[in-house]
Image: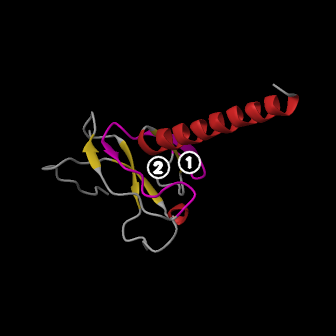
Amino acid sequence: MSNWHSWLYKGYRLVRVLILVIILSWLCKSFIISVYYVPSFSMYPTLSGGDYVLATKYDYNLRAPGYYPLTGIPFPYSFIGGIGSVQKGDIMIFDLPLFPRELHPTQKENYIKRCVGMPGDTTSLNR
């Protein structure tokens, strides 16, 4: 095999590995774990504004990612219940309600809040 065939084959193997790494990292971010930005100080002192947190996605639900990577093309919606259930005191991350859907997915905002009540509980503000 000539020298340029060897370089071509090595380049092909490198591209193949890079594509595999990109696909696996996208699947991991979409279904297993993701990084979220804390936009406000509403969770202080547990979380401060500007912090980044890692969150597992498989505990409460497994949901298909919203969009294909690097595009605005929606992914078909599918949902499977997770392996756990929400408990009082859990920190949850969810999409900002009523956020305009016509914006690109990278422009959406997330809420990071603590669960303070369960179905049947009554909450009140004591002053």
Residue type (three-letter) at the residue carrying disc 1: Ser
Does residue 44 appear in this view? Answer: yes
Badge 1 marks a residue whose secondary structure is loop
**Which residue in the structure is indicated by mark 2?**
43
Q: Which residue is mark 1?
A: 48
Q: How is the image coloured?
A: secondary structure
Kindly indicate the quadrant of the structure image that contains residue 60: top left
- Which residue is farthest right? 3
Q: Is residue 41 above or below residue 102?
A: above
Q: Earlier in the sequence, mark 2 or mark 1?
A: 2
Q: Are marks 2 and 1 in contact (CB under 8 Å)?
A: yes
Q: CA distance from mark 2 to mark 1?
A: 7 Å
User: What range is drawn magenta here?
Assistant: 45-71
Q: Position of residue 101 (x, y in %)?
A: 42, 71
Residue 53 belongs to magenta span = yes
Where in the figure is residue 3, as x and y percent of width and height? 87, 28
Q: Residue at x 85, y 28 (%)?
A: 2
* Residue 68 located left or right of residue 51: left
Q: At x 52% / y 37%, what residue is drawn? A: 24
The one nearer the camera, 56 or 119, is 56
* Residue at the image position 45 percent from the left and 45 percent from the top: 30
Which quadrant holds residue 9?
top right
